[in-house]
Amino acid sequence: MQHLSFQELFPHILFADFLRYFLVTGTAYLVFWVVFFKRWRHRIIQRKSPEVKKMWLEFRYSMSTVLIFALIGFGILSMKNAGYTLIYDNFAEYGGWWFIVSLALMLLLHDAWFYWTHRLMHHPKIFRHVHLVHHRSINPSPWAAYSFHPIEAVIEAGIYLLIVFTIPAHGLALFIFLVYMITRNVLGHLGIEFLPKGFLNNRWLNWHTTTTHHDLHHKHFNHNFGLYFTWWDRWFGTEDPKYRETFEEVTSREKVSEKPIPARVLKILVGAILLTNVAYAQSPVGTWTTFDEDKGTPRSIVQIEEKSSLLEGKIVSLYLQPCEPPDPVCSKCSGEQKDAKIVGMRFLWGFKKVDDKWTAGYILDPGNGTTYRSNICLENADTLKVRGYWGVFWRTQTWKRVK
Ligand SMILES: [Zn+2]
Ligand SMILES: [Zn+2]
């Protein structure tokens, strides 16, 4: 085979490694957390959405892992070209059976490698220097699939070296293995249990790990170290004692049904809306209730006004949680708003009307002092969709008009 230089080959490997991460992770995030979110929200294992800030951190660490995987990938390819590895190109050399057996061996070897290196990284002397980065995601999102400290990324990549020097593997078998590995990694951090209830009662299937299995590892740290299979955790007594119970609880939850409002009630409501809200029917101007994203309970009442063709909003009152101070201040805010009272605070500004949307504005979350780029769209006269952006991520909140 023709020998390509680092400059010629490395960008391609880097791009392929990035695509492998980004396509699988992005697809999982879009399908479960955006497009079909309503269908899956009752299955959110820890009952709360991953924080946008954390997802951004997970993404950044994953990029450093992609770089490390690509460097090691380049090394392996160079060694293959020099004839040092057991990777083969001619399918007939080992035949169809070996192709399947080699795939199974790769998975078994990787599972063992992962379990034992993972336990090693949980050793108190090593944990905080290496593996803590991955465990900063207590409620992980799919973007955490590659969220490793650089040393952990090198340890994770050790399996590639182990395979290419011990198992004769066809290039296609290696490719399938890599795709399965990233898919399993992404699903382990999905945060939503998508498998059917009863999966763990099936003795032919329950040797495979589930999303709940790895999610519990992030929540409790000290159990469920396995990757693909459950047997190492069972043999060495490290399976989370609450694993089966948690899986049953999550998969038994009722789907949140959105019952249609009876036609008679709808008529009365529409009449009332027309009578009281004609002036503001097509505008976000007015008073709105905001809701806690995780619990769905009312969080605050806010007032939106239009000033010089721009929207501006302030917090009118708060639904205080137990133990919250009666008149809380924004301790995490910066600048002028540092320690300012939250009630009365100007928290929304700069939205401009473009077609049927209000865009390019900002919203300050007094809970964490962060300002988000944001768009507002009036879904109907009484429902406002507020979308906040953080880097490439976004979250949409629904606000309801106060009558
Ligand atoms: Zn993890
Ligand atoms: Zn761990």
Image (tube, grey):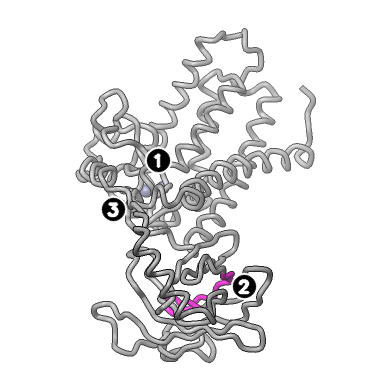
Q: Amino acid at mark 1?
A: Thr
| Residue located at (65% from left, 35% from top) | 75
Task: Please tell me how crowded label 1 is: few (under 14), some (14-19), or many (20+) other residues with Cα within 10 Å.
Answer: some
141 lies above or below 196 = below
The residues bearing labels 1 and 2 have C-alpha atoms spaced at a distance of 51 Å
Q: Secondary structure at mark 2?
A: strand
Q: Is residue 123 visible?
A: no
Residue designated by label 2: 358
Q: Which circle, 1 or 2, is nearer the viewer? A: 2
The residues bearing labels 3 and 1 have C-alpha atoms spaced at a distance of 18 Å
- Mark 2 vs mark 3: which is more N-terminal? 3
Q: Position of residue 320 (x, y in %)?
A: 30, 80
For the C terminus, the image quarter is bottom left
Q: Is residue 324 visible?
A: yes
Q: Position of residue 110 (x, y in %)?
A: 44, 31
Q: Position of residue 107 (x, y in %)?
A: 44, 27
Q: Position of residue 339 (x, y in %)?
A: 43, 90
For the N terminus, the image quarter is top right
Residue designated by label 1: 117
Q: Amino acid at mark 2?
A: Trp
Q: From which residue to which does the magenta span run?
A: 364-376
